[in-house]
Image (cartoon, rainbow, N blue to C red):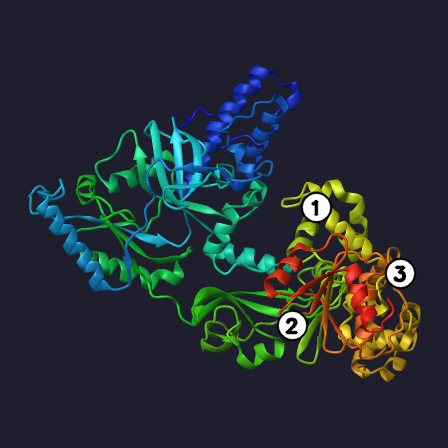
Amino acid sequence: MSTPTTENPYLRDPPVEFDPVQDLELEAAEEQVERLREAIREHDRRYYAENDPIIADRTYDALFARLQELEDAFDLAHPDSPTRAVGGEPLEAFETVEHVAPMLSIDASGEADDVREFDERVRRELRDAGYDGDSDDGDGNGEVAYVCEPKFDGVSMEFVYEDGSLERAVTRGDGHEGDDVTRNARTIGSVPQRLHDDPPESFAVRGEVYMPKDAFQAHNRERIERGEDPFANPRNATAGTIRQLDPAVVAERPLEVFYFDVLAASDLADSHREELEDFPRYGLRTNDRVEIVSDIEAAIDYRDRLLEARDDLPYEIDGVVIKVDYREAREELGQTARHDRWAYAYKFPARAEVTPIVDVAVQVGRTGRVTPVALLEPVDVGGVTVSRASLHNPEEIAAKNVNVGDTVRVQRAGDVIPYVEEVVEKGSEGHYELPDVCPVCGSTIERNGPLAFCTGGLACDAQRRRSIEYYASDDGLDLEGLGEKTVRQLVDAGLLESVADLYKLPQKRDALRDLEGWGETSVENLVAEIEASREPPLAEFLSALGIPHVGPTTARELAREFGSFEAFREVAEDDPAKLEGVDDVGETVAETIHEFFASEANAAVVDAVLEHVSPQEGDLEDGGDELAGLTFVFTGSLEGMTRGDAQELVEAHGANATGSVSGNTDYLVTGENPGATKLADAEEEGVDVLEEDAFRAVLEERGIEA
C-alpha cells in the first residue's frame, strides 16, 4: 500500500518500448508486472485524486497495454490489478448485499430559515448534552464548525476496502442494502483498486458516481446521432450505466467519482475535515469546493456563492450539504430512522424554462430527414426535466437566430415535445448552421425548402436501423417482439445490419439465446413471426419498405392499382408520372417514390429483401360490409392463411385490422405462438380472444368464405 519510490522505472520518464514477451522468464515478468501495477496505481492517484499527472496520456496507455500483455501471456491476473478496469464478461444479475453502515438520506429544504432552525437545534441539543464546543476552539463556548460541500446530483454508493484492496462497491438501494456493482465500479478510472499510503485496515467510504456535464452532452450527442433516445440528465445517465449487466458497456461510458464521507473504519479520525484531508493520500478523489465555516450564516453564504457558480461547474449539483465537523458532536446528535441529525441539505431552486444551449446534435430520421436538436443544461419545464429540445429545421434556426452558447426559453408543445421558443440572452454570434454532410454516414445533406435530408438512403446506418424498426412495426409487417429496443439490441450484437438480415435470424437461434433477456420461448416466437412474414400482402410490404410519404393507406391504393410489386416498381423507376393517377399520390409523392427506387443503395436493400420475401398479389376490391364496425387484431401464426391475408380479408368486408389491442378492439385472433403482450392487453381491456377455428366460425356466421 506504500507509494512507489523513484526507483520504480515506470514512475517518471518511463520507457514505452519493451522486450518481446517471449524473451522474458516468468520471474522477470512477475517483477515487471508488480512494478507496472505500482506505477499505474500512482499515476491513477495523481491523475484522479491530485489532478497532477506526471506522464502523458499516451505514455500511460503504453504502460497499461504492457501490463495487460504480461498478465495475459504469463497468466498473472489479480483481483486488484489496474487491468480489472477494462470490464469482463456480462453478469446475469446483481447480488443484493447489506451495507457495513446505514446510508441514510439527508433532511433538506430550499429555505434559509429552515437551515437556521437546523443550526439552532444542533446547538441546543449539543448544549443540553453537555458538549462544550469543538476541541480546537479551546474556549468551551459551544461553537460548532460546519463542513460545507456541494450536493452532487449523481448516484451515491458504498466502497468497501479491506487491507487496502477494493472488496466491493454497492449502490445505496434502500439505505440498508443495495446491489453489488463491484465489477462495474472497477471500470471507473477514479475508483482505486488498491489504496495508497496507510489507510485503515477496514475502510468503508461513501462516494458519488456521476457523469461530467461535457461528457454527458457528448454521450447524448452520440446516442442521438445513432438514433437512440438520449438520457434526460446526467443522473439518469449515471444510474442507467452503473446498473448495466455488461461491465464492458460501463467501461466505455465517462463516469467519475467524488468521495465525501467515511461510513465505517477500523480507525476513525476525530473530525470530518481530517478524513477529507486523508482521502487524496489514499487515492480517493475529493471535491475542491469543500469549505469549513464557523457559523450557519457563513454556510448560507457558501450556498449562495455556489448557486451563482452552478452553471460554470463541470458537474451537476442541486444544492449544498452542511455537516457538523467533529465526530463527538455527531455522535451526540445521532440519527433518526431516515436521516442523520448532524447534516442538512440546503437545496437550489430548480432551473425553470430558461437554460443555455451547450451543443447541437443532428438527428437523422427513417426517411433521411435531418433534425437539429439542442442539447441543454437540464431545466425544469412544467415539472419535467428537459435536456434536449427540437430546433425544427434550418429556417426556424435562422429566424430565431439561435446558436450554441445562447440562453434560451424552452417550452413543451402540447405538454409533450420540448422546443426552443426564443433566445433570451445571446451568447454567440450568428445562428447555427447544419453541417454539409451527414454525421452518421458522411453523405451530402441537401435542402428541400425549409427541410434538410441526408442523401445516403439505406446506406446510412441511422436510416437503416430505423428502416428495420419500421419494417417490423404496426405500419409495416407487424412483427411482434421486434420493437425499437429489440432491434437496437440485435444491431448492437451484430445480428442485424439490414432488413434482409431479419430473415437470416432463424439460422442464428444460438446467438439469440445468448443475448440478455432471451430464452427458448422468445427466440421461437420471434422465428415464427419472421417465417410468417415471408409472403406478406403487397400493400403491407409496400408500406413496410418505408418509402417516404407511402404509409398504409397510400400503400393500399398502390397495391390496388398495380396488383404486383414488379409492376409497381417498373412504373416507379421508369415512368413515375403514371403514379399520379393513383389516389393519394400527387406529383411530389410520385417524385419521392421515384427517387427512392433510383437510389442504388435503396435498390440494393430492396433486392436483398426480395431474396427472402414474396409479396402476394391480392384482390383488394371491397367484398361487402358484413364486418362493418368491428376491429380485429391478429397475433401468432395462422395455419390456413397468413396473418396478412386475414387482415386483408376482414378489411375487404368492412372491418378494421389494427396492430395493437385497445379498448376499441372487438376480437384478438390468436394463432400458434401468440404474443404475450397482446394477450395481456386483451385480458386487461376485456377483449374477446378467438383461436383460428373460432375466427373462421365468426366469418362463416356472416357468410364470408375463409
- Secondary structure state at the residue bearing disc 1: helix
Image coordinates of residue 160 in percent, x first then y, are 39, 34
Image coordinates of residue 505 in percent, x first then y, are 78, 48
Count up the numbered dots: 3
Q: Label 2 crowding class (10 Å Cα cut-off): few <14, some 14-19, many 20+?
A: few
Image coordinates of residue 115 in percent, x first then y, are 22, 59
Residue at horizontal 87%, vertical 84%?
A: 581
The CA span between labels 1 and 2 is 29 Å
Q: Which residue is mark 2?
A: 664
Q: Which residue is mark 3?
A: 614
Numbered mark located on residue 501 in the image: none
The kind of residue on which mark 2 rests is Asn
The kind of residue on which mark 1 rests is Thr
Labels 2 and 3 touching (C-beta < 8 A): no
Residue at horizontal 57%, vertical 35%?
A: 62
Which badge, 1 or 3, is on the more N-terminal residue?
1
